[in-house]
């Protein structure tokens, strides 16, 4: 009974809970949809104990869970007469992946206009340039992130996302303008630092949060009418550590599209987010040999753009 009540309370009030010590709430936020599993477990307990109180508590929590995730559960709204303008693919390819050609085949099967990659290495980059360059001749790379496009790219530059404690040469942020059919789109490719569970520190997200704040500031200063953020943000849309970014751009919450880990996807930490445009659908692509699944999305631009 107490566990069921605690889950219901967490679902409703998690943004107000403190993140220290150990940032346990942050860890729960990463896997927030899975807290709903307490409901069937609680109903089993209620049946065994013949407890109406526990059964009612489970039904209440089920209603709370359904309310929190109603965008995923409800049927999609009637499609807008305005068709989507871009298909975008975002993928952390893994710096241990030895088959760029396989990765490229999977990504290109989605017929994307724009492809964003993270964890590129000096050894793998030439192969990606060759494989993706056949259909996406316009590309840019900064450090370990890259962008390929069927449309011209301009104003290519580095975005500083480096936490203060990390040494020089850590480059995981890129900005370029995609000159597409609906106008210029300022496109950011980002890879925020990984998070870890430490025995002495709990759920350690400090570097990730610091990078998210830097990205948020860059987006706040961005003056382009249409903005895309593509990247492995190492957090979900329910994680408050990403609030500086999510206050500036948003994605689609109508699909789960869990992208990590690839073998048993439990969370969507790879994102396509937009401002001045709408992410109308998000889905995952087949396994590429990375520990992440690729994420694809349709992006719709305002009529007349």
Image (cartoon, rainbow, N blue to C red):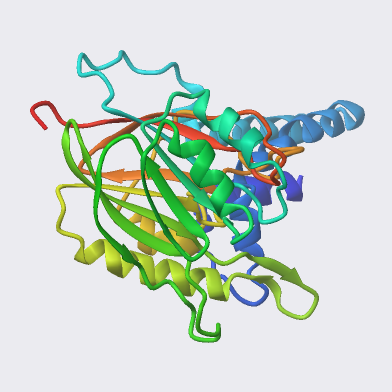
Is residue 112 in view from this perspective? Answer: yes
Residue located 38% across and 60% down the image: 174
Task: Tell which of 175 and 292 is nearer to you.
Answer: 175
Q: Position of residue 292 (x, y in %)?
A: 65, 44
Residue at the image position 8 percent from the left and 28 percent from the top: 304
**Which corner quadrant of the image does residue 56 belong to?**
top right
Q: Is residue 199 left or right of residue 242?
A: right
5 or 304: nearer the eye?
304
Residue closer to the observer: 25 or 194:
194
How many marks on residues? 0
The image shows residue 297 at horizontal and vertical percentages of 42, 31
Could you say where residue 112 lies in the image, as x and y percent from the top left? 41, 29
Q: Nearer the viewer, residue 123 or 149?
A: 123
Q: Residue at x 59, y 70 (%)?
A: 205
Taking the image as shown, residue 234 lies to the left or right of residue 98, namely left
- Asked if residue 96 is positioned above or below residue 36 in the image, the reply reads below
Q: Residue at x 53, y 68 (%)?
A: 208
Residue 58 screen position, x and y as percent: 69, 33
Left or right placement of residue 146 versus residue 137 in this view: right
């Amino acid at each position: 009974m107490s566990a069921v009540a605690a889950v219901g309370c967490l679902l409703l009030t998690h943004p107000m809970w403190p993140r220290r010590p150990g940032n346990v709430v942050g860890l729960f936020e990463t896997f927030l949809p899975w807290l709903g599993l307490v409901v069937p477990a609680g109903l089993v307990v209620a049946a065994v104990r013949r407890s109406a109180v526990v059964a009612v508590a489970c039904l209440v929590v089920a209603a709370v869970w359904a309310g929190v995730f109603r965008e995923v559960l409800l049927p999609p709204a009637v499609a807008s007469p305005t068709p989507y303008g871009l298909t975008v693919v975002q993928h952390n390819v893994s710096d241990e992946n030895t088959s760029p050609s396989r990765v490229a085949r999977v990504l290109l099967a989605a017929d994307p206009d724009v492809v964003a990659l993270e964890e590129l290495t000096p050894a793998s980059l030439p192969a990606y340039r060759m494989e993706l360059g056949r259909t996406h001749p316009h590309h840019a790379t900064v450090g370990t992130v890259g962008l390929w496009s069927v449309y011209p790219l301009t104003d290519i530059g580095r975005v500083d996302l480096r936490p203060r404690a990390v040494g020089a040469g850590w480059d995981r942020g890129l900005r370029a303008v995609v000159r597409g059919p609906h106008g210029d789109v300022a496109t950011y490719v980002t890879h925020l630092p990984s998070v870890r569970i430490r025995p002495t520190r709990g759920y350690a997200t400090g570097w990730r949060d610091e990078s998210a704040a830097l990205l948020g500031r860059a987006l706040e200063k961005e003056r382009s009418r249409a903005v895309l953020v593509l990247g492995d943000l190492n957090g979900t849309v329910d994680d408050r550590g990403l609030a500086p970014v999510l206050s500036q751009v948003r994605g689609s919450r109508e699909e789960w599209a869990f992208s990590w880990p690839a073998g048993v996807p439990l969370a969507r930490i790879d994102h396509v987010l937009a401002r001045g445009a709408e992410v109308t659908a998000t889905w995952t692509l087949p396994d590429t040999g990375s520990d992440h699944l690729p994420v694809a999305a349709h992006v719709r631009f305002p009529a007349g753009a």
